[in-house]
Amino acid sequence: MTFHYNPQEAGPQYLEDLATGYWLSETLFTAVELEIFDKLDLSGKTVFELVNTLPVAQRGLERFLQALCALGLLTGNGTRYFNTKLASEYLVTGKNHYQGDSILWRKYLKTGWQHLAKSLAAGERTYYGPPEEDPELLARRVRKYIKAMDNVAQIKVIEILPFFEGLPLSGKILDVGAGSGAMAGGFLEHFPALTATLLDLPHVLDYTREIMDERGFGERLTYCPANILEPWPLAQEGFDLVILSNILHAYSQDEIPTVLERAARCLKPDGVILVHDFFSEHHPEKAGLFDLNMFIHTYNGIVFSETWVREELARQRLTTTELLPLTTDTAVIFAAQKIENLESLRLDAKALLQARIKTLGFKEVVLVPTMRIHVPNWADLRCQYGCDRYGKPHCPPNSPSPQKTREVLQDYTLAALLEGEPPARSFQRQVLLAEKQAFKAGFYKAFAYWAGPCALCETCSTEGICCNTRDARPSMEGAGIDVYETVRRAGLSLRTLSQQGDYVRYFALLLLE
């Protein structure tokens, strides 16, 4: 199952894909459990070679391998099968970015999801897993969880480190709810002058110590056994960097303010807090489902919004960045006592702008190279023949010609596609705000093309002369841009409406630099 459909326009195929999503997960779970990717990694194998090493029948294996090929995990010529690059990098045991433990932990969570209806009826968690009175069984489960989170954290820290690239980072890190220590470990590997304190439950840190000793960090690490919800036995203002990674969603709206207060107290005056988590504004489909997962599997865990988290940080007298989306399904917020501490971070101007524009209410904000904007010779004909607005101000022939648009695009390398919805006037005002945000952020060439005829004024001049040239902008299609093809090239979807009342999506184009 993918989340690339727009549920409001996809129809029954979207519903079918939702209903059969477990086909994908069960196929992946089984392949990881059978260690198929381990067996294929070096030189591939034939079905006959594989079947002798697996507890499966040849007839079933052939069909299973074909399914894995269809999913892009394997490739083959009908007789010999090989891992794809994706499988080789992330699904082979022992490789640096191995994700198999994380994947199989998701299988463990599946049982709880089967109790979703009961949890909804009760309004709280109803599934607590099988009874595990044997301490050894409980310890084994904790280890599986930590290994799973280690898989994820090792990938996430790779995305987060560039924010600190080139900085002479030194001093002390506090990693709250450290788990395997992978997040702090990434910083220690990258910045030799750092030391770290890992704060977590005692039985978690017992296993964490084993992992970190294997990685050779030794005396650079201190372990602090503690319950996050109880007072932290740490010195105030003792840390240069405080990491709260995947911690917020595990607790309630009543508990997190206390966690943030303690994190702020541990921060040196020139230090930085790093909040890494799921947020409802970033990858909202995944965030919504992850929030439901917290409802099923925790006492009071919840996925928070960027707005709420930043407001709580502000209550601690901290200045924050906007939500900074990672390329995966999580995002980060940085906080500090002084804005100068945030300005020293390597915050990508484009990512910051993208986040700011998203908060204006757009469904999607996608950065695209201008070379992907398609300007054919026929697009303005749709305006001249078939639209009763032809000849109005800022509609053809009073809008830029296709040739003029091509010439303008030669002065730009980057643009943003903004997706919204009716009413047109509201959408167009949002687009103007986005253009203003871009200008303020230093993109002085920012210029917008929006969707459809201009709708800003209550009444439009009948003389073909605009009375609001300050705010009016041309439409994409009126300026010769093929909206459907441009949207497709940006990795989004758009289709023609088959009947009145179908869901309408608007797209605008914001030229940046």
Image (cartoon, rainbow, N blue to C red):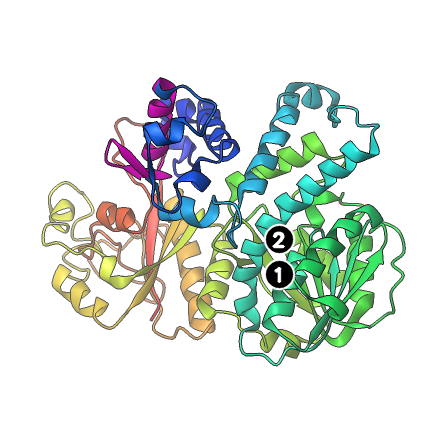
Q: Which residue is mark 2?
A: 306
Tag 2: Cα neighbours inside 10 Å, few (<14), some, or many (≥20)? many
Q: Amino acid at mark 1?
A: Ile
Q: Is residue 112 above or below residue 184?
A: above
Q: Nearer the viewer, residue 247 or 447?
A: 247
Secondary structure under tag 1 reads strand
Q: Which residue is mark 1?
A: 333
Q: Nearer the viewer, residue 372 or 143?
A: 143
The image shows residue 403 at horizontal and vertical percentages of 12, 64
Task: Say which residue appears at 66% left-offset and 26% top-offset.
Answer: 112
Q: Nearer the viewer, residue 418 or 84?
A: 84
Instruction: Tell whether label 2 touches label 1 (CB within 8 Å).
Output: yes
Magenta stretch containing residue 70, yes or no? yes
The image shows residue 194 at horizontal and vertical percentages of 69, 74
Q: How many circles with numbers are drawn on the protein?
A: 2
Please name which of the two marks, 1 or 2, marks the residue nearer to the observer. 1
Q: Which residues are magenta?
A: 59-81
The image shows residue 35 at horizontal and vertical percentages of 49, 36
Q: Is residue 394 above or below residue 82?
A: below
In the rendered image, which quarter is residue 374 located in? bottom left
Task: Say which residue appears at 17% left-offset and 64% top-offset.
Answer: 406
